């Protein structure tokens, strides 16, 4: 299982639009993807309700995991998406 740790930048939390963009990208992955705070149980990154229910705010650290062929590439893309402030 591959994982990446991401610190959300200022102004970027996992609310409405950013969460939807993250879930859409995770859903496009051909493998299971989870997200959670370090030490907490992860949730399904392909579920908008689960992701928004986490209430992740700017500056918080989250861990995204994926398992399967190409997991590292999927995680790199998700990390870039999470670290990019909305335009």
Image (cartoon, rainbow, N blue to C red):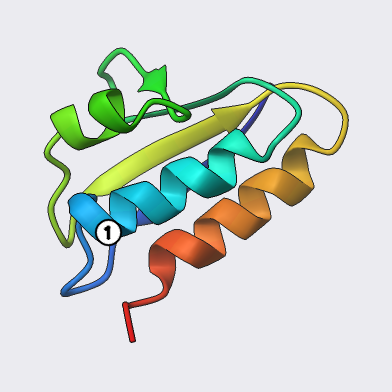
Q: In the displayed structure, would residue 70 be above or below residue 49?
A: below
**Which residue is pictured at 33% across the width and 41% down the height?**
62
Q: Is residue 22 visible?
A: yes
Q: In the displayed structure, would residue 17 be above or below residue 74?
A: below
Give the quadrant of residue 8. bottom left
**In which quadrant of the rendered image does the C terminus lie?**
bottom left
Residue 77 location in percent, x, y? Answer: 64, 58
Residue 27 location in percent, x, y? Answer: 58, 35
Residue 73 location in percent, x, y? Answer: 77, 50
Residue 46 placement, left or right of 65: left
Residue 76 placement, left or right of 20: right
Which secondary structure lies at badge 1? helix
Residue 42 location in percent, x, y? Answer: 36, 18
- Residue positioned most to the top: 41
**Which residue is pictured at 75% across the width and 43% down the height?**
72
Q: Which is nearer the eye, 85 or 19? A: 19
Q: Give the labeled residue for mark 1.
A: 17
Q: How many numbered circles are shown?
A: 1
Give the quadrant of residue 17. bottom left
Counting other residues with Cα less than 10 Å from the Cα at mark 1, is it few (<14), some (14-19), or many (20 or more)?
A: few
- Residue positioned most to the bottom: 87
Q: Is residue 38 visible?
A: no
**Which residue is pictured at 66% across the width and 40% down the height?**
28
Q: Which is nearer the eye, 86 or 82? A: 86
């Amino acid at each position: 299982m591959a994982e990446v740790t991401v610190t959300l930048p200022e102004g970027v939390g996992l609310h409405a639009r950013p969460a939807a963009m993250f879930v859409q990208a995770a859903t496009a992955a051909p493998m299971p993807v989870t997200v959670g705070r370090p030490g907490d149980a992860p949730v399904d990154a392909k579920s908008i309700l689960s992701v928004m229910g986490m209430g992740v705010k700017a500056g918080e650290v989250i861990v995204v995991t994926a398992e399967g062929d190409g997991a590292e590439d999927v995680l790199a893309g998700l990390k870039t998406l999470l670290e990019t402030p909305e335009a």
